[in-house]
Amino acid sequence: MARGRKIKVVYKKLGREKIWGQADDYIEIDPRLIGTGVKHLEVLVHESLHVCFPDISEEAIEKAGVRISKTLWSEHYRRVDNSKSTIPLQDGKL
């Protein structure tokens, strides 16, 4: 992944692979997770970690993904953002 670029997310049925998501240069997530809340967040975070840190072990990714997801969920982060915030992210971009 080129640094600083948005990670592309594609929704694709992954039932045959018996997985909820996978990552390489982009992320594929099974669309059956849409609307599942915390599980969707967990898979998205998990696969994002794989893209950002490809050399980290699966075990470490799992632990970090679950911990980050639980933290975000407990702080009431959800998929919808109605705030129209103009506060930039840490990279200076919206």
Image (cartoon, helix red, strand yellow):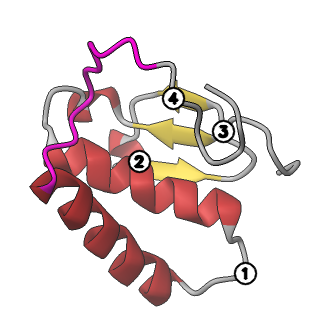
The residue under label 4 is 87
Task: Please give left or right for residue 68 compared with residue 51 in the image.
Answer: left
What mark, if any, has residue 55 been given in the picture?
1
Q: Secondary structure at mark 4?
A: loop
Between marks 1 and 3, how big is the CA–CA gap? 17 Å
Q: CA distance from mark 2 to mark 4?
A: 23 Å
Position in image of residue 57 (x %, y %): 57, 87
Among the two numbered marks 4 and 3 on one chain, the one whose residue lies closer to the N terminus:
3
Task: Give me the C-alpha separation between circle 2 and circle 1.
Answer: 18 Å
State whether residue 5 is above or below residue 42: above
First of labels 2, 4 by sequence position = 2
Q: Nearer the viewer, mark 1 or mark 3?
A: 3
Question: Can residue 19 be seen?
Answer: no
Q: Is the residue under label 1 in contact with that under label 2 (CB below 8 Å)?
A: no
Tell me which label, 4 or 1, sits earlier in the chain. 1
List the residue tagged with mark 2: 44
Quarter-wise, where is residue 37 in the image? top left
**First in sequence: mark 2 vs mark 1:** 2
80 falls in the magenta region: yes
Which secondary structure type mostly characterizes the magenta part of the structure?
loop
- Mark 3 neighbour density, 10 Å: few (under 14) some (14–19) many (20 or more): some
Amino acid of disc 4: Ile
Marks 3 and 2, how far apart in space? 11 Å
Viewer-nearest residue: 19 or 55: 55
In terms of sequence position, does the residue under pointer 1 or pointer 3 come before the other?
3
Please tell me whether mark 3 sits on a helix, a strand or a loop: loop
Q: Residues within 10 Å of mark 4 (few under 14, many from 20)?
A: few
For mark 1, does the 10 Å Cα neighbourhood hold few (<14), some (14 to 19), or many (20 or more) residues? Answer: few
Q: Which residues are magenta?
A: 75-85
Residue at the spot 66% in from the left edge and 58% down from the top edge: 51
